[in-house]
Image (cartoon, rainbow, N blue to C red):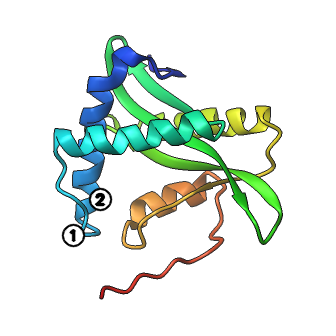
Amino acid sequence: MVEIRKYADTDLEQVKKLLIELQNYERQFDGGRAEATEEFATWYLSHIFDNVATQQGVVFVAAQGDMICGFTAGYVQEELERREQFFYISELVVTSASRGQGIGSNLIRAMENFARSKGLKSIRIGVLAASLQVHALYKKLGFQDYAIELMKSL
């Protein structure tokens, strides 16, 4: 049985491994991504944890006993054009061995419940354009395409 719970400091090493796995996975869609090393994971997570701490955020993990098989992080952001705040899921990863078991869906539901508890009316998540399988999952969970961000290499 998988338990969704708030992140604890003792989860750090396993979450770093998950972040490295996510970075390696996403490199197939974006070859310009930084190399997935422990140093990268430490640096990246420090930024995520700072955003969570300063922007009314939260980190959840999916645990099977002592093993962390997924995690998600998110925080409140503001869209100036709409003059409203929304909850942004900045990270979501499930180990490759645990995918297809509803763990990612349960992590997203935990984030939705957290956002509702903050009185927010919308939630957002990003996906790399070439990551069609992940995009399809998010649409299945009720997310709709909202904005398209374009990038040009210089």
Near-viewer residue (12 or 102): 12
Which amino acid, by three-letter code, is at mark 2? Glu
Instruction: Look at the image and tell me in which quarter the C terminus lies.
Output: bottom left
Is any part of residue 81 visible from this angle? Answer: yes
Instruction: Look at the image and tell me in which quarter the N terminus lies.
Output: top left
Residue with the mark numbered 2: 26
Give the side of residue 79 with respect to residue 28, left or right. right
Residue with the mark numbered 1: 31
Location of residue 11 (image quadrant): top left
- Identified at 83% across, 39% down, the residue is 119
Give the side of residue 122 with respect to residue 133, left or right. right
Q: Secondary structure at mark 2?
A: helix
Location of residue 32 (image quadrant): bottom left
Q: Give how far apart the Cα atoms at labels 2 and 1 are.
A: 8 Å
Of the residues under marks 2 and 1, which one precedes in the sequence?
2
Which amino acid, by three-letter code, is at mark 1? Gly
